Image: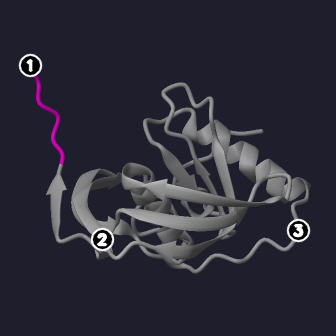
Amino acid sequence: MAVRKIVQYGDKHLNKISEEVKEINDEIKGLIQDLKDTLGTVSGVGLAAPQIAVNKRVILIDVTEDNSDPIILINPKVKSASKETAVDYEGCLSYVNHEGLVERPTSMVVEALNEEGKLITYSVKDFMARVFCHEMDHLEGILYMEKATEMYVLEDIEE
């Protein structure tokens, strides 16, 4: 479909609670393809619909280098999360050249619809649990900076 512009910190779409997807129709399938096309052009592992200015509860996660194994989450819900947490660095495609330390559960169980409308249960740990949390926060209008205990500006170091 199309590579979309990733909206940046300060854009109103990033602070809105996204709408539940009622039907997986051509509009939603087009949105999913746009998320795939857009994530394929940047160095990131996840993209939520609000980041391309669409406030629908749709997320794409793909941690492969060649974007060959996309996970689509439609209307995701956390079923359980570990009490055990870990603090690690996070960045965001909507707040480039920054990262922060964020505390997240080390494991969780999430239910979501896939792009065929089938309910799938995901049990994720460590890095994937962090990615799921980060992207699901976007659907609630929450940015990782709001949860970070420390923030850093990343600078290019010329050799």
Residue ID for mark 2: 84
157 vs 94, left or right, is left
Residue type (three-letter) at the residue carrying disc 3: Glu
Q: Quadrant of residue 28?
A: bottom right
- The kind of secondary structure the magenta stretch mainly shows is loop
Where's residue 24, x and y in %?
A: 87, 61
| Image spot of residue 103 (x, y percent) | 27, 68
**Image position of 25 with respect to 17: above or below:** above
* Label 2 – label 1 distance at C-alpha: 40 Å
Q: Residues within 10 Å of mark 2 (few under 14, many from 20)?
A: few
Give the foreground label among 3 and 2: 2
Q: From the viewer's perspective, is 64 left or right of 147?
A: right
Question: Is disc 3 surrounded by few (<14), some (14 to 19) or many (20+) residues within 10 Å?
Answer: few
Please name the residue that numbered disc 1 is placed on: 159
Secondary structure type for disc 3? loop
Q: Residues within 10 Å of mark 1 (few under 14, many from 20)?
A: few
In the picture of the structure, the residue carrying the numbered disc 3 is 23
